[in-house]
Image (cartoon, rainbow, N blue to C red):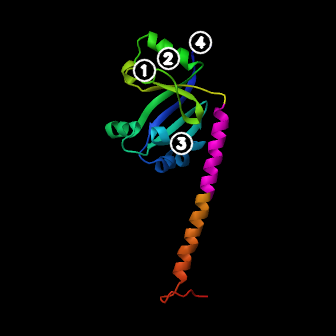
Amino acid sequence: MNGSIIKISHIAIVVPNLEEALGFWVDSLGLPLEYVEHVEDQDVDVAFLPSGNSEIELLEPIHPGSGVARFMEKRGPGIHHICFQVEDIEKMLSRMKEAGVPLINEEPTIGTGGKKIAFIHPKGTGGVLVELYELTAGESERRLERMDDMRRRLSQGGRVYAAGVMAFFTGLRATGDGNSRQ
């Protein structure tokens, strides 16, 4: 492994509201929604939409002080970064350091799905935030676990929603004196 680039992994787009953004990207444009993930340490919710061998990654900041929220406040919604999958992230980072490229992460961290990630500072790329990522052995298993968790939460949410609707209709059927109509 020489640290070379394998492919463009994804293009990340910051959106103010993930649900509204999915209306365009999924409903209108027709991209499939692979999964949604809450990334606590980055204060974002992320939706992954595959397109060919790459993905569109939608980022909704969930905390006003997060880096993504500050980015959106300064630049507005739109393209946040481009991500390249690499064979060996440590070798790629070493190559960047040797070339004098400013890095945000000098060592990889763990990103969504458990992959190794690192960011290159826009000062060294002509103004574009660049992410590097290396696939890890357990990434596919972690994605399946997160999808199962999301299905479980959606199922629970559906039950809560149904109970709320039933309570609403029960309330509508109630008479002015608090007794239910039969």
Name the magenta segment's main secondary structure. Answer: helix
- Residue 175 vs residue 69: left or right? right
Picture coordinates of residue 162 (x, y %)?
59, 67
- Residue 23 vs residue 154: left or right? left
User: What's the distance in space between the residues labelled 3 and 1, CA to CA?
Assistant: 26 Å
Which residue occupies 47% across, 38% down? 41
Range of magenta residues: 138-155
Which of the two discs, 3 and 2, labels the residue nearer the N terminus?
3
**Disc 4 residue type (three-letter):** Asn
**Disc 2 residue type (three-letter):** Leu
Which of the two discs, 3 and 1, labels the residue nearer the N terminus?
3
- Residue 105 vs residue 91: left or right? left
Which of the two discs, 3 and 4, labels the residue nearer the N terminus?
4
**Magenta stretch encompasses residue 17:** no
Task: Give the residue number, with chain letter if any, for mark 1.
Answer: 103
Is disc 1 placed on a helix, strand or loop? loop
Q: Quadrant of the C terminus?
A: bottom right
Task: Give the residue number, with chain letter if any, for mark 4.
Answer: 2
User: What's the distance in space between the residues labelled 3 and 2, CA to CA?
Assistant: 27 Å
Picture coordinates of residue 37 (x, y %)?
55, 43
Tell me if label 1 and label 2 are in contact, CB under 8 Å: yes
**Disc 1 residue type (three-letter):** Leu
User: What's the distance in space between the residues labelled 1 and 2, CA to CA?
Assistant: 8 Å
